[in-house]
Image (cartoon, coloured by chain):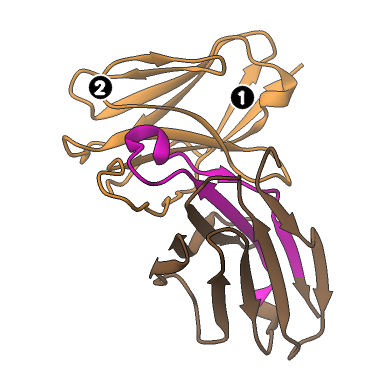
């Protein structure tokens, strides 16, 4: 596709349920990032992948959050036993990575998944 | 990454140039200045970046002071669709195979008025 695709666009769940959010990056982009944005707040980094490995998981807020990326493409962010404070927009971005110095550092974002935990 | 300071909000008349300032007084020699914007209910969008020379693309111009302690993003002919939150970010470029997170501050909420 032309851009980063995220699904679902909206997700409403009950407290305590598990949710999976999907990100399909731009074709050929080796780096993939997850951020979240709570209402009225700035973006908060969660995790990034280079290929299938995750060199930086420092932003994951708790062990209820996990992410994987298989085949160097699609990534899934999983939140277990959701809490109301998990309600936010979850944004995915991708970049070329690799040897592309300046331009490889440009991240392209999807439209996000709006998660509401009731 | 160096900390940036931006005004929380600005207004600009449609058709006029919008000039958005950013202070980054602790920027180091190898850090670039990047600008992104986020239109309501959308993901952030890359606008432009630079090191020390002024840069221009189809969206905007970036003016970086000689001492690199501040910069200005210029939207030459602002339209209503340019209403968004604009983020100034400084960071080192990718120098090895890998990538880095973006650290977003609060940005400047730019409102274009008809």
* One can see residue B5 in this view: no
Q: Which residues are magenta?
A: A86-115
* One can see residue B32 in this view: yes
- The residue lying at 53 percent from left, 49 percent from top is A94
Which quadrant is home to the C terminus of chain B?
top right
Q: Which mark is residue B52?
A: 2
Q: Quadrant of residue A38?
A: bottom right
Residue B86 in the figure: left or right of residue B91? right
- The residue lying at 57 percent from left, 36 percent from top is B37
Chain name for mark 1: B
Is disc 1 placed on a helix, strand or loop?
Answer: strand
Q: Colour of chain A?
A: brown
Report how far apart the C-alphas of labels 2 and 1 lie in the structure.
27 Å
Q: Which chain is orange?
A: B
- The residue lying at 79 percent from left, 58 percent from top is A9
Does the magenta run of residues contain A98? yes
| Mark 1, residue position | B11
């Amino acid at each position: 596709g032309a851009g980063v695709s995220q699904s679902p666009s909206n997700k409403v769940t009950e407290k305590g349920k598990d949710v999976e959010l999907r990100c399909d990056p731009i074709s050929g982009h080796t780096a993939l990032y997850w951020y979240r944005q709570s209402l009225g707040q700035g973006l908060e980094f969660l995790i990034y992948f280079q290929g299938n490995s995750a060199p930086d998981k420092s932003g994951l807020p708790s062990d209820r959050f996990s992410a994987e990326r298989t085949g160097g493409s699609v990534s899934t962010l999983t939140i277990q036993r959701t809490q109301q404070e998990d309600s936010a927009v979850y944004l995915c971005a991708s970049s070329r990575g690799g040897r592309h110095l300046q331009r490889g550092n440009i991240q392209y974002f999807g439209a996000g998944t709006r998660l509401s935990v009731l | 990454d160096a900390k940036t300071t931006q005004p929380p909000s600005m207004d600009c008349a449609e058709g006029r140039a919008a000039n958005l300032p950013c202070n980054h007084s602790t920027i180091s020699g190898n850090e670039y200045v990047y600008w992104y914007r986020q239109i309501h209910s959308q993901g952030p969008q890359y606008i432009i970046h630079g090191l020390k020379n002024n840069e221009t693309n189809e969206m905007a111009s970036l003016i970086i002071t000689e001492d690199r302690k501040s910069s200005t993003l210029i939207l030459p002919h602002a339209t209503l669709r340019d209403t968004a939150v604009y983020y100034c970010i400084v960071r080192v470029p990718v120098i090895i195979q890998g990538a880095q997170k973006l650290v977003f501050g609060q940005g400047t909420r730019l409102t274009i008025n008809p």
